[in-house]
């Protein structure tokens, strides 16, 4: 049969099944009684919060009556219910102002994912086999309580570990309160892109342990060291809006933008100037700019204030950083450095950003502190067109109750500081110490170098319970799975620290009812806390998550909300309608807190592997679509072409055009990329947008277990990274690995456009 | 080719999926829109069978007792579709009214099992016709329900008394001086 014939048959038969469908009601799926009153065909827009990345944008969810195939009481059937159909940005929200990025749009697929965990599961096969049996919620909670209550009675500190993705607001408080009250072990927060280096640098330079909010819209000159601020770094939607204003929003004035990075990013691709520097020389570059400004007295004296004090030699005018001395090391010309410095000083307000790979070298902390000093010298800290540090909403904390109960002087947020690496080491060296692990949305087995042996360590913990909605590399180790609602089915709150100059307390009720037999993670924790009793129940006095939220917003009303509503109840409903509360005033001047200085700065980057044996720097980067790999399970994200390479459904290795020619590598050839710690294979993507001695790979693919769409697809560059850390911080220096590259044969790579060139050489004109 | 076509439709796993005990709601296998070729042919020529309703609901009795169409079919004046009441809505009255009638017992049994009534569709356009119909503007223009749905005071379960052909729609649009532009309905 030819394709055409097949299409004819399909056309005759394929139109619609709905009308007659099954003429006899006995043959139909049963229909469950709808639980909500909806008018068919009429859409409502409900506010929600995007949880796809840490930016915390506000959403509007289009909800309409639809029919969903669901399981109720073990029976498959249909139910008429309000279903989320489309996500857009919330125009009232100060961060994204009605806009939404592709990752945010795809948030819809989390709810309807065919491989979502629909009901609590108990492990039946060996650990890691992914064999589970469905159980009821009563059983699941009974099992968890049975595991936890002897540990609680034991009163030994640190026996229960809680590993989560970064959390904020009331959700964070509930988890922190639970973890600390249960076994006095701080919650371990894990994310591959955790921003810890920038935050520590901001604390050292300015006294703020926070990411900056960049006022791009009022800036005239922007220098970015490696920060992909229009794609994935910090608060990309807010920054894209600001960037638009900077370029086109002010008639007659178009701000200039310079990107400094060894591999051109999506953001670098639209810069006026791209300066490919040697990996790890970003801080030297910044100080060289500062040298020129100081030497030529382009800025008023001592404008930089205390932010320069960590930098050695600043008071002598940074003589070691004269452009002639460092240009060769950076990989640019002294003239370029001097010119950029003069331009930045002349075009006030100028702002300098640093992020991503620039802070992920062993000297990343130095790079960030150097950039902070340059920002201070340019007078852009806390000034329009510069960087700000926001006042973050801090809801009332159960830790304070705990401190009172236990007669502790202070229980601070520093309690959250234990890292996944520390946890893995503790477990490996003392296997009987941590008895139980609780997991929520973090996937450290995927996103840590193999050399940290996180999987091996976690496997030693006798009991693991996960609250995640999908079985990934980490939660496949779980003995018990208590699936959370999807974000659209759940109450949500958020306190984003950057992206807007206003203080924000985002709040959203569920946009739709749960499709499956799931429960909200905070509700489960509160339920378990009450069953366990003791300090735990006292520290977490609320019955449900929404009760905790209501208490937090009542406190916020007392402090801030008197202008917004006439009483706490009205405030509570109004904030829900709007998607949250935000301060009327913008925070304009930072009041620097106490500084903590004393970490020695390491100036020179170190790389794992010798330059002769491993000639290339491996530069992993955040995938525009899959971010850190936590979005690879969403088919829209797999299908969406990368904005620069247009590759879909896979990984690729970016290699410089000339280097590739020298090595006889052609577009699409399968390469082996090997570090001292492992190797992987991926097709080559030949591009002029990368330094000749570097190769770059997007992070996100290479999952061994993460639903049908992500599993066994592409390669994971994190797996071959060296276990080196950022000096003075301890987080992974993920740009500090050297690799060798060899051609293996022909590879397979799907490009959206077929080719990057506008008229592909292979295409013959017909 | 036709034989192969048969095989294609016959082997459709749709029918099997319904008897399968697996609770997985979506099939991973490509399925055809129709279980049999006959079904496909019938749709192609617009031959439709008479819907079999699970309960012999009587419009006649309800209307004779003074109820209005919009008492149950809520939202018809506000949106594209009128709501078909859920079993809960029926039971607000039938908790006490006519509880001994066999059809009402069926109704109560549905409610007791936590199931809604699987009503069969009576009217409606085929997807392939690309017709978008919106009730609300018709109700606002004062079109009587009777005009398109027949006189319900004489029917028990709803029957297809009026044939919704394009000619039927256009004629009325012409009389009422409503738009007969193609994109009014086909978009």
Image (cartoon, rainbow, N blue to C red):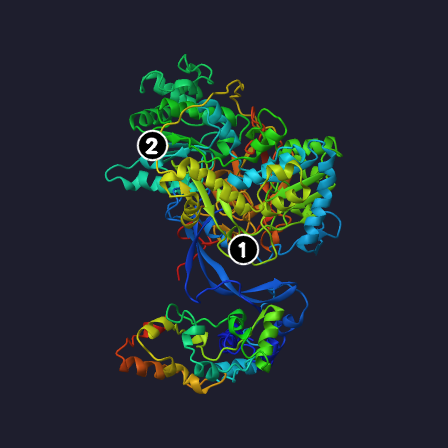
Q: Is the C-beta separation of discs 2 and 1 under 8 Å? A: no
What residue does disc 1 label?
A111
Relative side of A671 to A62, left or right: right
Q: Locate the N terminus of chain A and report the quarter of the image it occupies.
A: bottom right
Q: CA distance from mark 2 to mark 1?
A: 39 Å
- Say few, some or many: other residues with alpha carbon within 10 Å of mark 1 (under 14 / 14 to 19 / 20 or more): some
- Total tally of numbered discs in the picture: 2
* Image position of A433 with respect to B126: above or below: above
Residue A723: x %, y % from top left: 62, 32
Which chain hosts label 2?
Answer: A
x 71%, y 53%: residue: A131
Residue A290: x %, y % from top left: 39, 21
User: Which residue, as the protein is rendered here, is positioned at the far left?
Assistant: A252
Q: Quadrant of residue A375?
A: top left
Do badges 2 and 1 share one subunit?
Answer: yes
Residue A481: x %, y % from top left: 66, 49
* Image position of B20 with respect to A344: above or below: below
């Amino acid at each position: 049969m030819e394709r055409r014939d097949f299409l004819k048959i399909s056309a005759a038969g394929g139109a619609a099944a709905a009308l007659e469908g099954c003429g006899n009601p006995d043959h139909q799926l049963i229909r469950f009684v709808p639980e909500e009153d909806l008018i068919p065909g009429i859409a409502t827009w409900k506010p929600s919060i995007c949880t796809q990345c840490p930016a915390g944008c506000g959403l509007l969810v289009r909800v309409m009556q639809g029919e969903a195939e669901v399981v109720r009481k073990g029976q498959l059937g249909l139910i008429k219910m309000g279903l989320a159909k489309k996500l857009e940005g919330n125009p009232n929200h100060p961060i994204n102002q009605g806009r939404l990025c592709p990752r945010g749009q795809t948030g819809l697929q989390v709810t309807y994912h065919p491989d979502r965990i629909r009901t609590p599961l108990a492990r039946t096969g060996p650990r890691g086999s992914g064999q589970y049996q469905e159980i009821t919620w009563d059983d699941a909670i009974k099992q968890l309580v049975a595991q936890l209550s002897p540990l609680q009675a034991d009163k030994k500190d640190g026996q229960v570990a809680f590993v989560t993705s970064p959390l904020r607001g009331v959700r964070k408080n509930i988890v922190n309160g639970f973890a600390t009250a249960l076994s006095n072990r701080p919650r371990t927060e894990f994310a591959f892109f955790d921003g810890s280096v920038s935050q520590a640098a901001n604390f050292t330079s300015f006294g703020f342990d926070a990411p900056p909010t960049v006022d791009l819209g009022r800036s005239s000159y922007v220098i970015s060291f490696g920060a992909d601020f229009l794609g994935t770094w910090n608060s990309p939607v807010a920054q894209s809006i600001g960037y638009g204003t900077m370029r086109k929003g002010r008639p007659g004035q178009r701000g200039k933008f310079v990107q400094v990075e060894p591999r051109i990013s999506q953001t670098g691709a639209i810069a006026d100037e791209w300066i490919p520097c040697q990996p790890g020389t970003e801080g030297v570059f910044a100080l060289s700019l500062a040298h020129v400004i100081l030497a030529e007295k382009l800025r008023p004296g001592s404008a930089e204030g205390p932010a320069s004090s960590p930098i050695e030699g600043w008071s002598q005018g940074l003589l070691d950083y004269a452009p002639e001395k460092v240009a060769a090391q950076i990989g640019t010309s002294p003239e370029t450095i001097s010119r950029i410095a003069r331009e930045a000083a002349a075009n006030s307000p100028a702002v300098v950003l640093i992020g991503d790979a620039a802070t992920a070298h062993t000297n990343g902390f130095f790079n960030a502190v150097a950039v902070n000093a340059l920002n201070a010298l340019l007078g852009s800290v806390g000034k329009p067109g510069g960087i700000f540090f926001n006042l973050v909403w801090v809801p009332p904390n159960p830790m304070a109750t705990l401190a009172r109960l236990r007669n502790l002087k202070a229980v601070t947020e520093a309690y959250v500081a234990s890292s996944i690496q520390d946890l893995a080491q503790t477990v490996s060296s003392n296997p009987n110490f941590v008895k139980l692990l609780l997991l929520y949305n973090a996937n450290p087995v995927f996103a840590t170098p193999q050399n940290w042996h996180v999987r091996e360590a976690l496997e030693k913990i006798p009991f693991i319970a996960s609250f995640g909605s999908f079985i990934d590399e980490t939660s496949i180790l779980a003995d018990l799975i208590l699936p959370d609602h999807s974000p659209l089915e759940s109450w949500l709150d958020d306190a984003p620290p950057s992206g807007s100059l206003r203080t924000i307390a985002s709040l959203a009720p569920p946009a739709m009812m749960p499709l499956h037999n799931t429960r909200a993670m905070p509700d489960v924790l509160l339920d378990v806390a009450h069953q366990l009793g003791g300090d735990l129940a006292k520290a977490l006095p609320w019955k449900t998550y929404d009760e905790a939220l209501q208490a937090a917003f009542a406190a916020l009303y007392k402090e801030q909300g008197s202008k917004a509503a006439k009483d706490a109840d009205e405030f509570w409903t109004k904030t829900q309608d709007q998607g949250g509360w935000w301060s009327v005033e913008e925070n304009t001047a930072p009041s620097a807190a106490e500084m903590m200085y004393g970490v020695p700065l390491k100036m020179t980057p170190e790389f794992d592997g010798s330059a002769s044996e491993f000639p290339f720097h491996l530069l992993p980067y955040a995938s525009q679509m899959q971010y850190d790999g936590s979005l690879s399970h969403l088919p829209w994200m797999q299908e969406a072409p990368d904005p620069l390479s247009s590759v879909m459904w896979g990984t690729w290795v970016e290699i410089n055009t000339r280097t590739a020619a020298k090595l006889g590598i052609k577009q699409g050839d399968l390469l082996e990329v090997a570090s001292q710690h492992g190797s992987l294979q991926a097709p080559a993507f030949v591009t002029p947008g990368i330094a000749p001695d570097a190769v770059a790979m997007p992070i996100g693919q290479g999952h061994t277990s993460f639903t049908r769409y992500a599993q066994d697809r592409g390669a994971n560059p994190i797996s071959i990274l060296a276990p080196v850390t950022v000096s003075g911080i301890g987080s992974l220096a993920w740009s500090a690995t050297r690799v060798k590259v060899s051609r293996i044969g022909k590879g397979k790579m799907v490009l959206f456009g077929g080719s990057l060139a506008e008229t592909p050489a292979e295409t013959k004109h017909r | 080719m036709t034989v192969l076509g048969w095989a294609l439709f016959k082997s459709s796993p749709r029918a099997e999926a319904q008897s399968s005990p697996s609770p997985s709601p979506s099939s991973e296998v490509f399925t055809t829109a129709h279980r049999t070729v006959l079904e496909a042919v019938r749709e192609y020529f617009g031959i439709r069978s008479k819907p079999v309703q699970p309960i012999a609901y009587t419009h006649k009795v309800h209307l004779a007792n003074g109820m209005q169409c919009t008492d149950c079919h809520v939202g018809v004046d506000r949106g594209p579709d009128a709501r078909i009441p859920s079993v809960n809505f029926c039971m607000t009255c039938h908790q006490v009214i006519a509880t001994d009638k066999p059809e009402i017992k069926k109704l109560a049994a549905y409610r007791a099992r936590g199931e809604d009534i699987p009503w069969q569709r009576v009217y409606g356009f085929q997807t392939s016709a690309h017709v978008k119909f919106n009730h609300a503007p018709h109700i606002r223009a004062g079109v009587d329900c009777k005009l398109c749905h027949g006189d319900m005071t004489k029917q028990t379960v709803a029957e297809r008394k009026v044939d919704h052909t394009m000619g039927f729609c256009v004629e009325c649009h012409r009389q009422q001086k409503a738009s007969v532009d193609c994109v009014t309905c086909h978009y």
